[in-house]
Image (cartoon, rainbow, N blue to C red):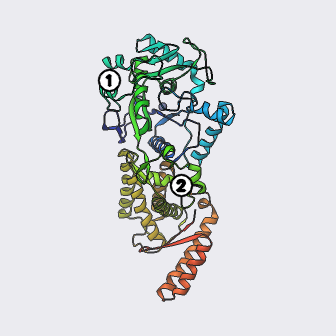
């Protein structure tokens, strides 16, 4: 099995042909959410990026074991080694059991991801369910001499490790530069160097999430869970590891050090990272007061939003950019995405329902359809260029609209039209995961489509006769009914407002 898929590998900084270790099997691990709050737009970008990787690999015929973890312990407030556990803090403030907090936000995360049509992973392990394995890996790293114990804490010895291995090879950071930039060791009990990170932390008396270990009662550090769970379900070396660019350092760098420290093997063959979403050019952060939760997009409940947006508009907006580019969010951009998505969704509907006086099957039409099919595939093979894939879908949509509006000379045969529909929906629905919508597949939509066709025809005739009053009245009445009519040079299009 060979594929033309090329991926940009963060660790080699090169675009490489994707060749899994044991085809057709592919192992993929993606860092999932820390469940102490609702998912925001940044979570959606990472989840949707790797959902498309998962969908495309399956489309190519691979059998993918996709593991995405839930962080429910050990993620401390400052993302390093001190402060309160984020989940424990929430539990304390809300007077809940920590696992109630975890369950609550895990359910809400699933609700938001389902709305975005993000497929569930094959395995969704939780850190708190793998404490024994985290203790075992910590013991192995200690036994190999890459960690030390002090006052009930176990720290990874970055300096010693970097004498033999290249710590920083993923992020491109250099140990000596990191050392001169790091702050003092205040409050980080017994660390030899500020670069060292915790594999195991001693629990203070008020710390609620705690387990017995050879080093006393405590809890695992944040990074170790991903090394442990990826190894447990995918093996010591596996194909793809994904996550947001914000996890590149220290989280993923530490994962490599831990896995190499425990097994002596490189854990990951292809590292993929999606870029961040900004708001008016600024990073989204709770501290800046500009994070927008996903459910707020869906119900319009945030002052930064002009209106509510359909989850598919959010998905389409994210896929319109290549996953390694930054993406700037704004209401204008989202409203443009809404229109673009409506055009593609309408084309999907037309491809499923159009009845024409079909033409004869010609080679020219065959070549045209094959050209689009090859174009779609090569865009996805080119490091998952969803932006270009969408551009090809727009070309097809223009052709399909022209057919529907009797403005196209090249009429396909029915079989050719069906083939075009299959090609289009393989990418639009299956790979990009853009749902055509419940109503679109029903008979009611076909009837609505026919009625709209008739109305827009009447309106076009009224305009041609300079009867603008009738034309405007049709458009305004439709607007009141929640249907927007858009005029373009290829005729009129309509969409039900989301
Ligand atoms: Zn992780």
Q: Are marks 2 and 1 in contact (CB under 8 Å)?
A: no
Q: Residues within 10 Å of mark 2 (few under 14, many from 20)?
A: many
In the displayed structure, 62 sits above or below 206; it is below
- Is residue 220 visible to us here? yes
Residue 350 circle label:
none
Rendered residue at 68%/30% (across/down): 97
Please name the residue that numbered disc 1 is placed on.
166
Residue in view at x 57 percent, y 55 percent: 302
Q: CA distance from mark 2 to mark 1?
A: 42 Å
Q: Is residue 258 above or below residue 43?
A: above
Q: Quadrant of the C terminus?
A: bottom right
Q: Position of residue 66 (x, y in %)?
A: 51, 35
As rendered, which of 223 and 97 lies closer to the eye? Answer: 97
72 on left or right of 57: right
Residue 318 versus residue 299: which sits nearer the camera? 299
For the point 53% across and 77% down, the residue is 456
Which residue is denoted by mark 2 in the rendering?
Answer: 312
Q: Position of residue 241 (x, y in %)?
A: 43, 33
The quadrant in which the N terminus is found is top left
**Above or below: residue 63 compared with residue 412:** above
* Residue 430 percent coordinates (x, y): 51, 49
């Amino acid at each position: 099995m060979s594929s033309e898929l090329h991926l940009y590998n963060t660790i080699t900084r090169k675009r490489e042909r994707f060749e899994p270790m044991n085809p057709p099997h592919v192992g993929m691990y993606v860092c999932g959410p820390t469940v102490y709050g609702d998912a925001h737009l940044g979570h959606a970008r990472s989840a949707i990026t790797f959902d498309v990787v998962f969908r495309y690999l399956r489309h190519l015929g691979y059998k993918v074991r996709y593991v995405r973890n839930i962080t429910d312990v050990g993620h401390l407030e400052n993302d390093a080694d001190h402060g309160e556990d984020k989940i424990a803090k929430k539990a304390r403030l809300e007077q809940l059991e920590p696992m109630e907090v975890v369950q609550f936000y895990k359910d809400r995360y699933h609700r938001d991801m389902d709305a975005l049509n993000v497929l569930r992973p094959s395995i969704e392990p939780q850190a708190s369910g793998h404490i024994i394995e985290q203790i075992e890996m910590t013991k192995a790293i200690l036994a190999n001499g890459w960690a030390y114990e002090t006052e009930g804490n176990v720290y990874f010895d970055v300096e010693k490790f970097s004498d033999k291995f290249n710590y920083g090879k993923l992020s491109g950071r250099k140990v000596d530069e990191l050392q001169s930039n790091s702050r003092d060791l205040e409050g980080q009990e017994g660390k030899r160097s500020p670069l060292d990170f915790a594999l195991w932390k001693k629990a203070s008396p008020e710390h609620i999430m705690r387990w017995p270990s050879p080093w006393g009662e405590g809890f695992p550090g944040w990074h170790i869970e991903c090394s442990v769970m990826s190894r447990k379900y995918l093996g010591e070396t596996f194909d793809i590891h994904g996550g947001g660019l914000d996890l590149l350092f220290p989280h993923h760098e530490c994962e490599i050090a831990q896995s190499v420290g425990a097994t002596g093997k490189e854990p990951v063959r292809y590292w993929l990272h999606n870029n961040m979403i900004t708001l008016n050019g600024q990073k989204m952060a709770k501290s800046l007061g500009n994070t927008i939760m996903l459910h707020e997009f869906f119900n319009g409940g945030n002052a930064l939003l002009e209106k509510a947006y359909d989850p598919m508009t959010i998905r389409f907006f994210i896929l319109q950019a290549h996953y390694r580019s930054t993406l700037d969010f704004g209401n204008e951009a989202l409203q443009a995405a809404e229109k673009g998505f409506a055009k593609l969704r309408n084309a999907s509907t037309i491809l499923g329902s159009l009845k024409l006086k079909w033409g004869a099957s010609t080679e020219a039409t065959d070549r045209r359809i094959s050209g689009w099919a090859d174009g779609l595939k090569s865009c996805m093979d080119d490091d998952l260029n969803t932006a270009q894939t969408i551009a090809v879908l727009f070309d097809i949509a223009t052709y399909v609209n022209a057919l529907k509006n009797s403005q196209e000379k090249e009429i396909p045969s029915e079989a050719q039209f069906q083939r075009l529909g299959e090609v289009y929906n393989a990418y639009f629905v299956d790979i990009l995961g853009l749902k055509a919508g419940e109503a679109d597949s029903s008979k009611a939509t076909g009837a609505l489509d026919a009625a709209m066709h008739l109305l827009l025809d009447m309106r076009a005739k009224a305009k041609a006769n300079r009867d603008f009053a009738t034309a405007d009245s049709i458009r305004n009445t439709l607007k009141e009914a929640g249907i927007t009519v858009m005029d373009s040079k290829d005729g009129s299009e309509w969409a039900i407002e989301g």
